[in-house]
Every structure is written in structure tokens, then in C-alpha cells.
Image (tube, helix red, strand yellow):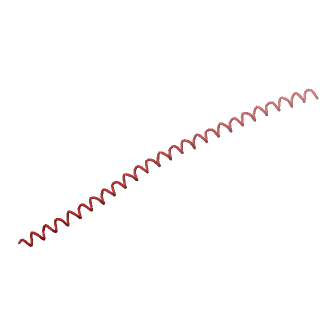
Amino acid sequence: MQEMLQQLKLEKEKTEVLLKEKDEMLKAKDDEIEMKGKEHEKMKSEFQKLEIERLAQIERAQRHVESLYSDWDLLHQRQSRILRQETRRLG
């Protein structure tokens, strides 16, 4: 009987050690998942910043192109006016 109690006590200790190891593994996994979640959020935030910057660059490029077209239209109008004036003067 004493030997059986000793055996049960030993089994209990082994089980407690295994449970403690399992708990530590689970905690490590939880920490890893939490860290990956934070990394994901950080990357998502960085991506959003880059996307905003990209859209701002596109908008600046569009304004620049519109400005060039506006300048081109003004130049074309000026050239047409000069050409008409020269035609009248020569004609």
C-alpha cells in the first residue's frame, strides 16, 4: 500500500511537471501570436502611410500635368494671336 501511494505521488509530480511545461509552451505561443499581431498592425499602418504618400504623389503629378497643359494652351493662344497679327500686318 505504501509503495502504491509512493507510485501515485511520483506520477502526480510527473504530471505536474508536464503540465507546467505545457503551460510554458502555451504562454510562449500566446506571446508569439501577440507579437505577430503587433507586427501585423505596424506593417498595416506603414502600408497605409505609404499608400497615402503614393496618392499624394499622384495628385501632385496630376496638378503638374494640368499646369503644363494650361501653359501649353496659353502658349498656343499667344502663338495664334501673334500669327494672326503677323498675317494682318503682312496681308
Pick out the residue farthest to the left.
Answer: 1
| Residue in the image at 29% along x and 59% along y | 24
As drawn, which residue projects farthest toward the right? 90
The quadrant the C terminus occupies is top right
Count every numbered label the image shows and give the total. 0
Identify the image quadrant of residue 22: bottom left
Q: Is residue 25 left or right of residue 56?
A: left
- The structure residue drawn at horizontal position 49% and vertical position 46%, both measured from the top left corner, is 46
Q: Residue at x 52, y 43 (%)?
A: 49
On the picture, is 57 further left or further right than 5?
Answer: right
57 vs 88: above or below: below
Q: Quadrant of residue 33?
A: bottom left
Q: Position of residue 20 (x, y in %)?
A: 24, 60
Vertical order, 15 against 27 (above or below) = below
Query: Is residue 91 at least partly visible in the picture?
Result: no
x%, y% of residue 35?
39, 52
Q: Is residue 78 left or right of residue 7?
A: right
